Amino acid sequence: MIGLGTGPIREIAVLGAHCDDIAIGMGGTLLTMARSNPGLRVRALVLSGGGTPRESEERAALAAFCPGCDLHVTILDFPDGRAPAHWNAVKDALAQFSRESAPDVVFGPQREDMHQDHRLLAKLIPTEFRDHLVLGYEILKWETDTPRPTMFQRIESAVAREKSDLLHRHYPSQVKHDWFDEESFLGLSRLRGVQCRSTHAEAFVLEKAILNIGTK
């Protein structure tokens, strides 16, 4: 498998429709990047959960997943499951977020996600981050919308287990779901690891990129 590098990373933008989307989709990648890039700027935008107990969960979780980072989190209060009905306001919020950040890489949900909130955000991200590397993460859940990923971030086995532990510690409101368990999280990361010849990995869908083949 050919490795493609991004070069030095100073700042990333991470976007989620709901509290816990980012951590489920790329928690292991966040831990890996944070420890490899001390002082990394992380700008996070979450569309829903603001003003509810879920906001406290999200802020504590992202702080744990981004140790040593310069972290700024914005959590809005769009209604869960109704984001498409607020298209204009979501678009405006995303535009403001893009103006206030300067990421080297942008992470968000992937376009084929069956949840309407995830899918809307995935489709809007490239309209505001037009000249950025945009990677779509996968969100494990009930729907059968697991993508065919094109990019993989290898993660250590200890990091995969740490991700599961942090998810359970910081999102007690979600433990009731039958899919929210260690077997699910480790099973998916093990599968993605197999697909990139690693023990564990997280997978992403590449939005668009330019290759400079055979050049330095």
Image (cartoon, rainbow, N blue to C red):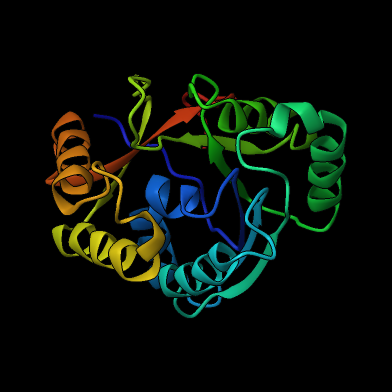
* Point 39% across, 69% down: residue: 170
Q: Is residue 162 left or right of residue 3?
A: left
Query: Is residue 209 positioned above or below 190 on the image?
Result: above
> Which quadrant would the N terminus be assigned to in this image?
top left
Of residues 178 and 46, the one nearer the viewer is 178
Q: Is residue 115 left or right of residue 127?
A: left
Q: Is residue 20 left or right of residue 104?
A: left
Image quadrant in which you'd find residue 31: bottom left
Residue furthest front in the image: 176
Q: Please state the horizontal and vertical placement of residue 93, each as a whole percent of the image.
A: 82, 46
* Point 22% across, 57% down: residue: 160
Q: Please state the horizontal and vertical placement of residue 24, each as a whole percent of the image.
A: 38, 49
Of residues 38 and 20, the one nearer the viewer is 20
Image quadrant in which you'd find residue 171: bottom left
Query: Is residue 12 positioned above or below 5 on the image?
Result: below
The number of callouts visible is: 0
Q: Please state the horizontal and vertical placement of residue 146, each as a whole percent of the image.
A: 34, 24
Q: Please state the horizontal and vertical placement of residue 55, each as a whole percent of the image.
A: 59, 65
* Point 42% across, 74% down: residue: 64
